Image (tube, helix red, strand yellow):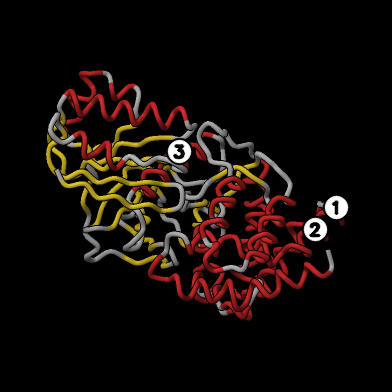
Amino acid sequence: MNISTVKSGDILTIELDGRLDAMTTSSLDGKLELDGVRELVLDFAQCDYVSSAGIRTILKAHQSMAKAHGKMVVKNVSRRVRELFELTGLSEIITIGKKTREISLEGLELLSAGVCGECYRLDGETVVKLYNEGVEPHMAEREKQYAKAAFVMGIPTAISYDVVSCGTRSGIVFELLDAELFSAVIRRDLGNLDHHAKMLSDTAKTLHAAKGDKNILPDLKERLRGYIREIGYLLTPEQSEFLMEKLESLPDADNCVHFDLHSSNIMMQNGELVIIDMGDFSTGSYLFDIGLIYMIYGIPELGISMLATKIPNEQGLQFWNHFEKHYFADKSAEERAFFEENKYFLASLRTIYCITFLTHLRSELEHWLKDILLPKIMETRCTD
């Protein structure tokens, strides 16, 4: 039995290769260091046999995660092993995912490409969101779960189907009949930025009006506490303390939050917007999403509008100004002033999060945070 582990933030993924039986369970026990782990993922892609001793070890790990108020997922389970889990009742206790369908990108139309992945059209009715190399495979499983929860709550999102793989990359298939990427719609009609910004504002308000089920969705504020601690190596103690103070000053809320809401994660279908890419769907304050949108479009020196949406940065800034006008139109002057005071901090949160798991972009992300955003954030300390 060969066992490899990958830690990404508060998520621990353990890949099993071989037989999980009385002779090898001790090896798995030795890898189950669960302090600070909020989600444990056991990957059975290369494990085709599990004995009763292995089942007891899996159950013990599940009980440890439940005691710590975390969650556990078993994925890529073969038919043989899945039947054993069903026979013993383990499948009624633990979330178990079957082996994923393999797809090829040959001949597929690329719809969009972002920091975390790409979106391709599979056929006339479906698209696939495919994560980039280096993004943990469990992200697709998690996104499918969150997308289902959002659909049930009436949030304008696509119907999610199966999780798939493409080589070492994982993805999720969505039903999007005759849909077009919202970024492409905007790029083709840059003279109507105000109209498009209002559409995004209305969609965001619909999302934020929904209350999230905390039994399914994570608390984003709690997750961000861990991410700020995780990038402590990059910060001075003063900077770390101030970022944490800023985070704690944000209002607690149980509203639904997308945390990657921008025009390349939205499709236009029959004249209406449909949100995709639900991998970071959470509960929290609407400010988390507005800060992300500001980062994408409202800070031209980062160049993210062009990078993530192919909308030129100059037009991206105009788009942001229209969006801000529409979104805050029915909010109090105090709420708008609070956002203005904290906008660079709110914009930094997605960067902080991405630093923890996008290793291939870490240098650029660290530059954005340390050289562009942090100086602006720390300036506000003088006026607090």
Amino acid type assigned to the residue bearing label 2 in the image: Phe
Residue beneath the point at 33% across and 61% down? 134
Query: What residue does disc 1 label?
Result: 332
Task: Say which label, 3 or 1, has the lower sequence index.
Answer: 3
- Give the x, y percent position of residue 204: 64, 52
Quadrant of the snapshot with the N terminus: top left
Q: Is residue 146 above or below residue 186?
A: above
For label 3, the residue is 148
Residue 196, visible in the rendered structure: no
Question: Given this view, does label 1 or label 2 mark the residue nearer the observer?
Answer: 2
| Label 3 Cα crowd, 10 Å radius (few <14 / some 14-19 / many 20+) | some
Query: Which residue lies at the image location 67% right of the left edge and 52% below the top edge?
Result: 202
The front one of 64 and 130 is 64
The numbered dot on residue 70 is none
| For residue 347, side relative to residue 360 (left or right) | right
Tag 2 or tag 1, which sits nearer the N-term? Answer: 1
Q: Position of residue 190 (x, y in %)?
A: 60, 75
> Mark 3 near mark 1, Cβ–Cβ under 8 Å?
no
Question: Is 334 rendered above or below residue 378?
Answer: above
Q: Secondary structure at mark 2?
A: helix
Residue type (three-letter) at the residue carrying disc 1: Ser
- The answer to which of marks 3 and 2 sits earlier in the sequence is 3
Q: Quadrant of the C terminus?
A: bottom right
Image location (x, y in percent) of residue 9: 45, 52
Which of the numbered marks, if any, corresponds to residue 338? 2
State the residue lying farthest toward the right.
333
Residue 167: % across, % down = 21, 58
**Kind of residue at disc 3:** Lys
